Image (cartoon, rainbow, N blue to C red):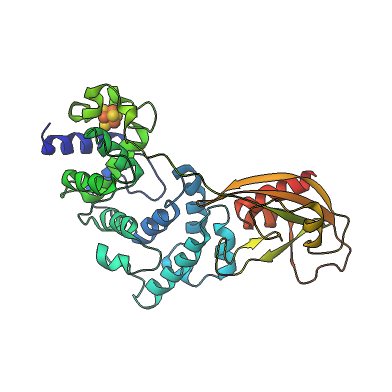
Amino acid sequence: MQKARLRRRLLDWYDRNARALPWRVSPAARARGVRADPYRVWLSEVMLQQTTIPHAAGYFLKFTGRWPSVQALAAADDGEVMGAWAGLGYYARARNLLACARLVAGQLGGRFPDTEAKLRDLPGIGAYTAAAIAAIAFDRPANVVDANVERVVARLHAVETPLPAAKPQLVRLAGALADAERPGDWAQAMMDLGAMVCRPAAPLCDRCPVADACQARTAGDPDRYPRKSPKPDRPHRHGAVFVLTRGAAVALDRRPSKGLLGGMLGLPTTDWVAERPSEAAARAAAPADAAWRRIGQVEHGFTHFSITLDVYRAEAEPAAAPELIWLPYEQALAETPTLFAKALRLGLLG
Ligand code: SF4
């Protein structure tokens, strides 16, 4: 199939099938001249850097309800934004989000730059996010290649090189396909095709608008692509986490601003190390003298390691641990990262 025909087929399919997303201007609205709000596009792209659309959508609505413009977000309290981000992971992103909002609202008069190169100068915006914002918010020609697009392109061309080594080749192939007349719709059409039809497992080739051009389908084994190198094992760490309650309140501390989960509220923990700490070592690291009980374990996966934490629970004396931050349980659950929320839930049951 010629490229021009493939582009027309995919864009026609997108015009009929585009997902309704809270940050998206539909293709029909875009055709009427409605333009995307760069603030909303930027916010959605930062949220989507490592999480799924269903998970990000609720956060997006919460953020835009509370801070409807880049100026409003720039003026927000750091702790409130970090709390609202809790559960989205990758907390350095929340810090960069605020830094970026303040730079745009302050030095740039509230306007996001409209080119990939200038967008890349902003905190927390890498090559992919800059390309996505340039295309979706400003309709600039850009090569937007996420995991969905990588998969579609690897299948269309039956690319045998495994990921991640295949990335430059996939970027080149995606760039050669990209539509220059409707760059924003093209980027979103490729993403939607990957998410809705050319799914990671069991792609729906009989519903695919570009099936005639697909080499993986012709070969009869689209699931085989993209080829992947085996992943190295992630290291595993251990530690203990402490759920100290006083009535309906729970004790938290703020993590150091640098490092993993930096600046977030969390439960007190031991260091996270290769060997599981003994019960005596864990109790010695507890944040207060109390009748600590070990009530179970929680598991969590970060990008570079996984972790098992022994969960200890105790009820505090009235004046214990004044240096910690005492919050109502529900608020603590909402404002702490997922690892701690898991331990809190177990702590309340235990
Ligand atoms: Fe993906 Fe199948 Fe379409 Fe090929 S034909 S792009 S494998 S959905």
Q: Residue at x 43, y 51 (%)?
A: 48
Quarter of the figure with the C terminus: top right
User: Which quadrant holds residue 200?
Assistant: top left
Q: Is residue 116 visible?
A: yes
Pinpoint residue 22: horizontal percent, then vertical percent. Answer: 42, 48
Pinpoint residue 192: horizontal percent, then vertical percent. Answer: 33, 39
Q: Is residue 222 above or below residue 121?
A: above
Image quarter where ligand 1 lies? top left
Quarter of the figure with the N terminus: top left
User: Which quadrant holds residue 128?
Assistant: bottom left
- 13 sits to left or right of 19: left
Q: Residue furthest bottom?
A: 107
- 146 sits to left or right of 156: right
User: Which quadrant holds residue 138?
Assistant: bottom left
Residue sitting nearer the eye, 344 or 56: 344
Q: Residue at x 37, y 26 (%)?
A: 202
Q: Is residue 210 above or below residue 182?
A: above
Q: Is residue 273 above or below residue 216?
A: below
Q: How many dots with numbers?
A: 0
- 148 sits to left or right of 272: left
Pinpoint residue 280: horizontal percent, then vertical percent. Answer: 82, 56
Q: Residue at x 53, y 70 (%)?
A: 76
Q: Is residue 244 visible?
A: no
Residue sitting nearer the eye, 161 or 295: 161
Pinpoint residue 42: horizontal percent, then vertical percent. Answer: 38, 59
